[in-house]
Structure formats: structure tokens, C-alpha cells
Amino acid sequence: MKKIKVFILLSFLAGPIIQLLGQDPNYSQFLNAPMYYNPAYTGLYTGLHARLSFRDQWPALPYDFKSYHFSADIGDRNLPGSGGLGLMLNTDNDGLGFIRNFNLGISLAVRIPFSAMTIGQLGIKASWLQKSVRWDDFVFSDALSEKYGNVYKTGFIPPANNVLNLPDFGVGGIVQFANEPGSLSGTLGLAVDHLFEPDQSFLQTAKAPLPRKWVAHADMIVAIGGSNGFNVLEEGALKINPGVIYQNQGNLNAFQVGMNLTKFGVYVGLWMKGAFGSYSNGSMVFLGGYRYVFADNMSVKFTYNYDMQLTGALQGTGGAHEISLVLDFGNISIFGGTEGSSRLRPHGRGGYDSRLECSEF
């Protein structure tokens, strides 16, 4: 039996019927997919970092929403601009799977030291966006009988093209800071994606721009105790990581606030998510995970979270499951042989503090 989808859901393709603009997938573990939200995270820490995220939204429904994100970046201070290079891949299906999105991009960031304990990064992303539609799986309203269901032949003539290929761009900036004792560090950032709002319409008679997405985020890491006292780089310290992210895209505003904690490689977290605008919903996010250090400057982190839906209208959807895998390989360089500008070297060689080069969480 063919899948059924009412004709009005084509409106985001056709435009004139009703204005219904889609939003990008949203990951609860946004700190484990930082380049997805801000390309300035590219190469923020030295070495090679690879991240994989999978999210299953509303699994109790007959057709859930699945999204995947992969990113890899390398921070190399011998790189011109002394920032980093990155690769990102995103894919998701819109509900029943009639519409699929694929996005492959590269990112580049430059590093700007402000002081020994404060640096900035500016990043840019250029990507290829592909959207595909399976027209044969749609059932249109003129094919439906009130008594017998889908029995008529539709008068809709689908466009010859069922695949769109579009360029897409994003930019962002980050300020990273730490205090002298090493007990506190954090980031502040602002980014905008879909900078030129590419047209997603499959119909030549209408436009369906992908709305520009604005992202503002902040997080902080506070270390308590440890064999070396208060130090965010000390594995034995209890590290508290509060954070907040706000997103605006089209007619949707979304926020998330909460914190993660880690000690001896074990992670727990509690977050509150909310969305408001064309519709409102809220959920509570419970997170757990573990980080295993298997060699010097080499580690793997696995985290899982469950989103418990709080909004009455969406209760019974099953919430959401999300898994993240993060691989860190320090001291990897692809541009050897030169030291670069003294302003872009760690503290002690004429630049900023070397603790800003390491991932603390």
C-alpha cells in the first residue's frame, strides 16, 4: 500500500497555497556537534577531531524523523591563518521519507589572539545542498473519495525535475576565554547559516527560500578539585559545563539551556528545550555518557540522551533518542615545517596560553 500524504503538505514546495517554511534538524547534544551550528568551531582545538550524531525524533509515530550529522576538523597552527579546516555532512528525511535532504560542506577558520587568555576565531562554510522528492509516493486530494479512499487518478502533473542541487553558505565567530588559574574557560559565539536563502522550490512558478538561521550560543567549563587543584585540563577534577543556545529560523524560535557534568570520564547532563513561534513545545533532556582515553592525546567519547516531551500536544510521540560519538586525536599536523606568526603560537613562545589549545570536556 502506498504511503499517504495530504496535498497541503506540498505547500512548502509550491508556495502559493500556504506559507509553510521548514527548519533545520536540531540536535540536543549541540556541544557534540559544534560545527553544525557555527563554522568558527573549525580547528578551535589542535589535532584531529571527528564527530558523529544520530537523532531519531518522535519514534512512536508511524513515520519518525531521522537525521545524521558527521563532521571532522583539524586544528593546525602552521596553517595559514592558523585556524583549521573542516568537513561536514548532514542528511535527514522529512517525516514519511518522501523528501530527503543532503548537505556536504567544507569550512575554514582563522584564529585571532586578543590576549594570553582570550582568542577569537572567524569561520566560513561553503556547501552543496541537495533536496530530492519521490512524487509517485504522494496521494493528492483530488484522488481521494470520501467513501473509498484513494481510488481516482490525480490531475497533478509533477515537475520533470525531482532533485535540486543548490549552493549554500554560512559564517560565524567565536570568542574563547580562560582565567589565569585554569579553573574556568568558556566560549561565546554567533553564526548565520543559509546566508543567501537558497530557493528550494521544485516549481518554476513559485519560490520557497530556505530561511536564514541565526544562532547565538555560550557555554562555560568550571573545574572543582583534582590532583592539581582547580584545573579544567585535570582529568580527576569535577567539571561542570553549563550552556545555552538560541536559534531563529523563519517563524520558529528555539532555545536550550542546561548543564553537563563529568568526572573520571563519566558524563551526566540535564537540559531544558523549548520552541515558540508558529508552534510551541517543550522537552526535558536527560544525558549520560563515557569518555575513554586510550593513549596520550587520543580519546573516544560516547553519549546518549533521551528527550522527554512535556508539551501536551506532542505527548505520546515517543520524544527523541540521540547518540553522539566523538573521536579526538591530538598532536596531528598536516602543515609541518614552519612555526607561523609569533602572535599565533601558544603562550611561552610569544602568544596565547597553551591551555586554550586543548578540549577540556
Image: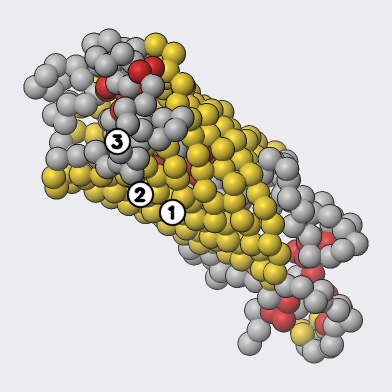
* Nearer to the camera, 177 or 9: 177
**Viewer can see residue 26:** yes
* Nearer to the camera, 321 or 93: 93
Q: Earlier in the sequence, mark 3 or mark 2?
A: 2
The Cα atoms of the two marked residues, 2 and 1, are separated by: 7 Å
- The quadrant of the picture occupied by the C terminus is top left
Q: How many marks?
A: 3
- Tell me the element at label 1: strand
Q: Disc 3 or disc 2, which is closer to the eye?
A: 3
- Which residue in the structure is indicated by mark 1? 70
Q: Which of marks 2 and 1 is nearer the N terminus?
A: 2
What residue do we see at 82% from left, 74% from top?
159
Q: Which mark is residue 29?
A: none
**Viewer can see residue 4:** no
Q: Are marks 2 and 1 in contact (CB under 8 Å)?
A: yes
Q: In this view, does 113 lie above or below 217?
A: above
What residue do we see at 73% from left, 72% from top?
162
- The quadrant of the picture occupied by the N terminus is bottom right
Q: In this view, does 137 lie above or below 200?
A: below
Q: Quadrant of residue 230?
A: top left
- Which residue in the structure is indicated by mark 2? 50
Q: Are marks 3 and 1 in contact (CB under 8 Å)?
A: no
